[in-house]
Image: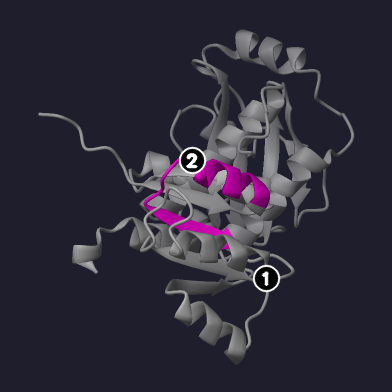
Amino acid sequence: MSAVAPPQLLLVDPHSLFRRTVAMVARQLGIAQVHESSSLEAAQRLLEHQSMDGLLLDIGQGLDALALLQSVRAGALRCPPSTPVALTAEACDLPTAQLYKELQVRRIMLKPFKVKTALEVIQDLARPESAQ
Amino acid sequence: MMTAPIPANEAERIQALRELLILDTPPEERFDRIVEFAAEEFGVPIALISLVDDDRQWFKARFGLAVCETDRRSSFCGHAIHVSEVMVVSDATQDPRFADNPMVLGPPHIRFYAGAPLEIRPGVRVGTLCLIDRRRRTLDDTDLAILMSLRDVVVSELLGKAAESGS
């Protein structure tokens, strides 16, 4: 019997201890193989060469993550355009939330949040679409 | 109170601890941020990196506690270094090892304790990353995995293997 490969997820966040802890626990609990990236630029480069089953992106101070998300939705990267995405943000007003909705963002997490919450979101992103 | 027992490999353990050259060194941001992160993640008032020396436990990093060391005999961490798993005491007032411990009966009024041993090589545990609360608590499997991962980060830092992962 062959082992099933865990879902591959990309976590983009500037906080190294947070990224590292999430990645280690997700692997330990068999939730997903979490790839880490400290910046959207590095994430863009990774996604040009490698597909992911889900993305958890820090929106940052500006809306830079939107350009990356738009590239995913446009099929310009290796991920399928329908790749599930969750965002983390310091704040989110209604027009911005509407914009995220149009880009099929599955979840917006407002900071601060716990590693445990991020793991729940990753578990949701890693779930096959048929199980939603 | 049950005094923290002495591990069978105590001489090797103390030698390994001394070789880290970390006892009585100043606070360091790389350790401080871990205890602060742990305290926030678990919502506990106290989180510590405790190193168990000959007759004391000395805190390399501390969140929520003013003192930098306490005696080993009454330490919870002195018990936690005997096992490789996380030692969880949900309610110290109900645990015969700790019910009359001075740190339970008086400040900091420990009720809950969880200590993840810092195993720097097989069987050699020099201290713990520990969480303390003044109320009864439990940890689920995800909590334990998070605490153990943070513990692994501490061990990597102690051994100088901490490399920034990710791009």
Disc 2 from disc 1: Cα separation: 28 Å
Q: Position of residue B43 (x, y in %)?
A: 60, 64
Picture layout, residue A77 above or below residue A82: above
Q: Residue at x 46, y 73 (%)?
A: A107
Residue A79 appears in the figure: yes
Picture layout, residue A39 above or below residue A129: above
User: In the image, which residues are magenta?
Assistant: A41-58
Which of pointers 2 and 1 lies earlier in the amino acid sequence? 2
The residue that mark 1 highlights is: A63
The residue that mark 2 highlights is: A24
* Amino acid type at mark 1: Leu
Residue A39 appears in the figure: no
Q: Residues within 10 Å of mark 1 (few under 14, many from 20)?
A: few
* Amino acid type at mark 2: Met
Q: Nearer the viewer, residue B74 or A109?
A: A109
Picture layout, residue A28 above or below residue B102: above
Looking at the rendered image, the disc whose residue lies closer to the viewer, 2 or 1, is 1
Q: Position of residue B127 (x, y in %)?
A: 63, 30
Q: Is residue B147 magenta?
A: no
| Displayed quadrant of residue A106 | bottom left
What numbered label is drawn on residue A132? none
| Displayed quadrant of residue A61 | bottom right
